[in-house]
Image: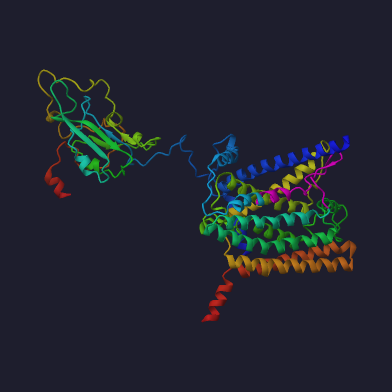
Amino acid sequence: MISEIVQGLAVTFRSMFRRRNTIQYPEECKPTAPRFHGRHVLNRYEDGLERCIGCELCAYACPADAIYVQGADNTPQARWSVGERYAAVYQINYNRCIFCGLCIEACPTRALTMSNDYGLTTDTREGLVYDKPLLLAPLPAGAAPVPRADPPQGPPSIARYGPQASLSQESGGVQPATAGEGREGLAPQPEERAGR
Amino acid sequence: MAAVIADALILLAKVVGVFAVLMVMVLLTVYVERKVVSWMQTRVGPNRVGPFGLLQSLADGIKLFFKEDVRPAAADRVLYLVAPVVIMIPAFLSLTVIPFGTSFGGEPAQLADLNVGLLFVLAMGSLQVYGLVLAGYASGSNYPLLGGIRSSAQMISYEIPQGLSLVGVFMYAGTLSARGIVDAQRDPLQVGFLPDWLHLPGWYVIPQLPMFVVFLLAGLAETNRAPFDLPEAETELVGGYHTEYSGIRFALFFLAEYLNMITVAAVATTVFLGGPDGPAFGFLPWLWPIVWFLLKVCAFLFLFIWLRATLPRFRFDRLMAFGWKVLLPVALLWIGVTGVVLAVDLAPARTGLLAAAGVLVVLLLAITLAGPLTGRDRRAARGAAT
């Protein structure tokens, strides 16, 4: 009994000089796992057009009902995204979000991905509702800002961006949760889905 | 007349000085406890407020001071308000008789040299039980009541070995006064078989070793510190007797607990480790005794913190068994041994005899300690049942 007490005291005493496990969080941040589910990013193509087509599939997929999308039509004078529609309003409510990543899997254009950013604290609940300007990736260098008027030869076709449209300029530099499954195409094939 | 006023002013200055030092010591003890326990758990501990987080406990105190004072509807109004004060005042008073140095130019470094000195400390310790029971009862709630009852049972049980452990020293020193006990320990140790040039201090920890151990253990239990922190066992009783207290009233309980810790450390220092006794160096002759006293007190405080970070809590029946069946007999036995040695009067050899016998008794104590603490009694009971 006494020897056990002495052993215990020795353990605690030795621990005093061991390396501390604490991370001084706001000053030093531990790097996350590479595929950590953090804040979402709405991506763009290289030419600055938004990938999001306002289809609301992410909102349907969301189990926590955290996403609100309101689509609108692109016009020749004001083009936001490739195709007919774009997201006029895009909100993710981080009061509700559980960072499951189902929205990323649901997104047909790889518009929505997740970054490793986990610093989401604010003082108010309103501050946790992120809208489009907060989520949207920055304009690539040299790209014209959106909305923009269509060029004289007509609107850019989806085919121009193609199913193999590069993901390299997605912001965050993170491989999305579903990367490497061959679903980078803009339109997932139904049989491919069924086969999974 | 002028002399009276001067005396009163000096006394007032000393009172204010001791009060201020105690408050600062409590703040520092809280800080050091959090820091040391953190280190022992490989954490960092408070490091945000002030340099190295030194002002953390001050910030906590200010926070508690400005918090809302919630008073439960079922509480007994008067007793509820009185209880924390009843706990805190004795905690401060018991430190008045402890000499924390030798003297400042003729003025003794002690608030009051009562001739009943340490008896006063014990009396103040007993008074605190009222505070705990009142707090538990007046809260008008179940958990504080349980905590209060537990604490009264525990403190009354451990007061007895604590008091008895000092009796041996009183007999040996022939005085109850803290100053007298400190002075008696200043003579060098006379063991008989050690060479003359080896000047060991005549601290009572040597002839009264079992009492020292008993006093420390009983003192830990008296201050409701881990591993004897059953009255406020967070995991069992929410917060114990102070569950219903908030804000500054809670702070008073907290303050009293840490003051008690300091008191036990100070009394142990005074009675067993020679108080402010220690080698003085050339300059500042009044400073060294204070430094030695504080160092010894801090060593005890560190021991208490260390034990808290290491040991799990006692079960209540084992706590009682330990107090009544181990500490009390050992204290009584040692009073008997001390009495016999003093009566037979083996003047030069008595310290040596007592020291040798003391080591024996402490070893016995260590062996008996194993009984109520390990599962042996439980296994024995199971064996009897089958």
Q: Is residue B164 visible?
A: yes
Q: Is residue B204 above or below residue A128?
A: below
B372 left or right, relative to A164: right
The residue positioned 67% from the left and 62% from the top of the image is B156
Stretch of the chain drawn in magenta: B87-114
Q: Is residue B299 visible?
A: no
The residue positioned 30% from the left and 38% from the top of the image is A93
Residue A114 among magenta residues: no
Q: Nearer the viewer, residue B194 or B26?
A: B26
User: Hey, which residue is sitting farthest top in the picture?
Assistant: A152
The N terminus of chain B - image quarter: top right
Q: Quadrant of residue B374?
A: bottom right
- Tally of numbered discs: 0
- What colour scheme does the image use? rainbow
Residue B111 among magenta residues: yes
Q: Nearer the viewer, residue B74 or A126?
A: B74
Q: Nearer the viewer, residue B311 or A98?
A: A98
B173 left or right, relative to B217: right
A64 left or right, relative to B253: left
Image spot of residue B196 (x, y percent): 88, 54
Image spot of residue B344 (x, y percent): 89, 68
Q: Is residue A38 above or below residue B348?
A: above
**Which SS does the magenta portion mostly show?**
loop
Image spot of residue B132 (x, y percent): 62, 56
Image spot of residue B362 (x, y percent): 72, 65
Q: Quadrant of residue B221?
A: bottom right
